[in-house]
Image (tube, coloured by chain):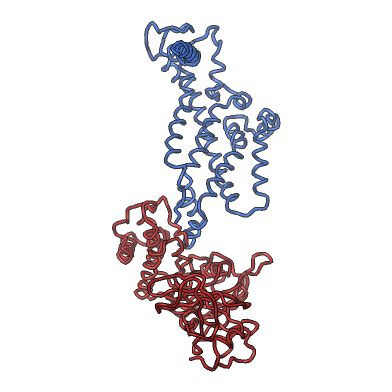
Chain colours: A blue, B red
């Protein structure tokens, strides 16, 4: 027994080292101003790499990423909540088939529709970050609509009828009753769209024509091998900053799930 | 406060006609109950009055004005829903003031009206709670409070008590009756429960299959049902229906009108006799304390089962034989179409 558990422990420790070492490398390199790319304890500690990753061109890339991700998430949410509400409330024939065929389209690899999207964007002069937002919104819409429709379905129609009898317009019903009750769903859609747009690489690669417009994903790519040498410390710090939103989204979502997902509507 | 009139009101869903031409005059301040089995169209009719359903034919008038195309908020009505429809993300106070806020009522006025309504409904301690934290009865009172603060011309209730347990239902029923006495507003109340209809209504509208079966005061419906459907639906226990042959034995000295197909006798209008009459075996005894219900299988007849209500002791136990007669002053005769015939012996 003893032997068995020791072997197991060693195996698990080995797994842990494999699992943790890239993160350890990332962290130790990021805080090491004279990093060489080796996995080692930093000889001196400093935040120079982070300072460098948050100034000049890198800062601009952070803003671009925030613009693309925030813009995509917000535009997706606005368009999807409007259309999902209509799909939830109006008895449109074949609405479910319609919704699922949109989702099927989303299952196709985006690379497959890259060419038409590129030419469409080119012809309307949207080969820039706004164009990326529009393209990513189109790709994210089906899933967002499906999710939000299911959320709106759980808001009892009687609540809307009650508000209508009390004199609320459709806009007021949406703003004061339906949307507040679907807060958790709206948050999920916003955060998921945000992360997916934040991680996007392919569209910026094609659409961003100038370095000023590069988001962080592109910046990271182009920073490799620039000026002949690789600045490991800078890259590590840049990567950590790039990963931060995903971690933040995780914690924000977790809080939201706990408070908001269950218990929509008051019955009997 | 307002009169309300329906003229040949119809409602169709596709090819299906659910309301088949209803005429009704409701006087200012009346308490009207729509009652009927599920699917009779009573809720649809209420929703048409509220403006939540389009009117397919005929007119709905409130206060002398045709309201067919008037949106719900401009009809001067307030509605209490079966599920209460409280906004879960708002406090009780916010729930009650929502409608007034929308109509741009001054803040002080809103506060005043909410406080008055909360006083009437004993909701003061709960004003800052969320509906989630309230019991079913309290939620029901908030829903009523939300209707009161708007000071509507007509109150509409859609099965408001059906989500409450029996004890609370009785209590809330009395509260609604008190509220009507206090406010004097026209109220229309939908229920499938004939007890609620009997106890609350000034007049009851019995609906069956989208048509009015009878309109009348509770006692009119109980004493003089216009047809077998109303006779069977209204009353604490279901009326017994006897064949003319059974009726001849239960009513040996009574001449029934020509064309009688069935004779209705309520369980409380049967009398136990020592011999003669209709005869059968007691199957089940339901003891209520103040009275008991005896379910009796009659000997070899087409309509084999009757219910007998009695507060006497020693009527019999399960398996005992029993002889019954009907009180000739309280019998109802119906023709082949189920319409009531006049019975000379009845008072």
Instruction: Where is residue A258? Give x, y as percent.
Output: 43, 38
In the rendered image, the quadrant that contains the C terminus of chain A is bottom left
Q: Foreground residue, B30 or A34?
A: B30
Q: Foreground residue, B73 or A147?
A: A147
Instruction: Where is residue A18? Give x, y as percent.
Output: 50, 13
Residue at x 46%, y 67% (from the top left corner): B157
Residue at x 51%, y 89% (from the top left corner): B328
Q: Is residue B36 above or below residue A110?
A: below
Instruction: Where is residue B236? Give x, y as percent.
Output: 46, 75
Q: Foreground residue, A193 or B267?
A: B267
In the rendered image, the quadrant that contains the N terminus of chain A is top left
On the picture, is B179 further left or further right than A92? left
Residue at x 57%, y 34% (from the top left corner): A133
Q: Is residue B301 above or below residue B40?
A: below
Res. B218 in view: yes
Q: Foreground residue, B114 or B40?
A: B40
Task: Please identify the quarter of the rendering in which residue B109 is found.
Answer: bottom left
Q: Is residue A18 above or below residue B230?
A: above
Instruction: Where is residue A230? Give x, y as percent.
Output: 52, 9
């Amino acid at each position: 027994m003893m032997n068995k558990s020791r072997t197991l422990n060693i195996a698990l420790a080995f797994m842990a080292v494999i699992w943790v070492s890239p993160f350890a490398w990332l962290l130790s390199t990021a805080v090491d101003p004279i990093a060489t790319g080796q996995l080692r304890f930093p000889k001196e500690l400093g935040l120079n790499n982070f300072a460098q990753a948050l100034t000049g061109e890198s800062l601009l890339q952070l803003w671009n990423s925030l613009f693309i991700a925030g813009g995509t998430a917000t535009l997706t949410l606005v368009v999807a909540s409007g259309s999902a509400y209509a799909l939830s409330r109006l008895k449109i024939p074949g609405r479910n088939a319609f919704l699922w065929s949109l989702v099927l389209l989303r299952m196709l690899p985006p690379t497959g529709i890259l060419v038409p999207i590129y030419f469409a964007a080119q012809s309307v002069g949207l080969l820039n970050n706004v164009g990326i937002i529009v393209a990513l919104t189109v790709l994210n819409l089906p899933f967002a609509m499906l999710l939000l429709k299911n959320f709106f379905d759980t808001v009892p129609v009687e609540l809307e009828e009650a508000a209508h009898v009390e004199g609320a317009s459709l806009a007021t019903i949406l703003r004061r009753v339906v949307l507040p009750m679907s807060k958790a769903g709206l948050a999920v859609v916003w955060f998921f769209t945000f992360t997916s747009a934040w991680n996007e690489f392919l569209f910026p690669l094609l659409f961003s024509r100038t370095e000023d417009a590069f988001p962080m994903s592109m910046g990271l790519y182009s920073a490799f091998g620039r000026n002949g040498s690789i600045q490991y410390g800078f890259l590590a710090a840049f990567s950590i900053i790039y990963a931060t939103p995903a971690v933040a989204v995780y914690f924000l979502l977790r809080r939201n799930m706990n408070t908001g997902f269950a218990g929509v509507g008051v019955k009997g | 406060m307002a009169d309300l009139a329906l003229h040949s009101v119809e409602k169709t869903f596709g090819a299906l006609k659910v309301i088949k031409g209803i005429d009704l005059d409701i006087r200012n301040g009346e308490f009207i109950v729509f009652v009927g089995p599920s699917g009779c169209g009573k809720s649809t009719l209420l929703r048409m009055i509220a403006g939540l359903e389009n009117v397919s034919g005929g007119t709905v008038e409130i206060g002398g004005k045709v309201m067919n195309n008037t949106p719900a908020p401009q009809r001067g009505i307030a509605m209490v829903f079966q599920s209460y429809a409280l906004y879960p993300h708002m406090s009780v106070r916010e729930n009650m003031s929502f409608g007034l806020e929308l109509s741009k009522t001054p803040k002080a006025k809103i506060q005043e009206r909410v406080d008055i309504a909360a006083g009437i409904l004993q909701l003061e301690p709960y004003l800052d709670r969320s509906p989630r934290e309230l019991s079913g009865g309290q939620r029901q009172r908030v829903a009523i409070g939300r209707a009161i603060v708007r000071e509507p011309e007509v109150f509409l209730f859609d099965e408001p008590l059906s989500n409450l347990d029996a004890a609370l239902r009785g209590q809330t029923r009395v509260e609604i009756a008190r509220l009507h006495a206090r406010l004097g507003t026209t109220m229309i109340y939908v229920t499938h429960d004939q007890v609620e209809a009997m106890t609350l209504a000034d007049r009851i509208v019995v609906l069956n299959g989208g048509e009015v079966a009878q309109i009348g005061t509770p006692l009119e419906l109980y004493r003089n049902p216009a047809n077998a459907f109303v006779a069977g639906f209204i009353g604490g226990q279901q009326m017994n229906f006897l064949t003319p042959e059974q009726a001849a034995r239960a009513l040996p000295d009574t001449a029934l009108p020509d064309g009688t197909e069935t004779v209705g006798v309520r369980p409380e209008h049967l009398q136990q006799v020592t011999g003669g009459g209709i005869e059968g075996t007691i199957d089940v005894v339901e003891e209520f304390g103040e009275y008991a219900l005896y379910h009796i299988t009659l000997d070899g007849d087409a309509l084999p089962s009757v219910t007998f209500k009695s507060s006497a002791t020693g009527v019999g136990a399960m398996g005992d034989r029993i002889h019954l007669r009907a009180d000739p002053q309280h019998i109802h005769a119906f023709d082949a179409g189920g319409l009531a015939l006049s019975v000379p012996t009845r008072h």
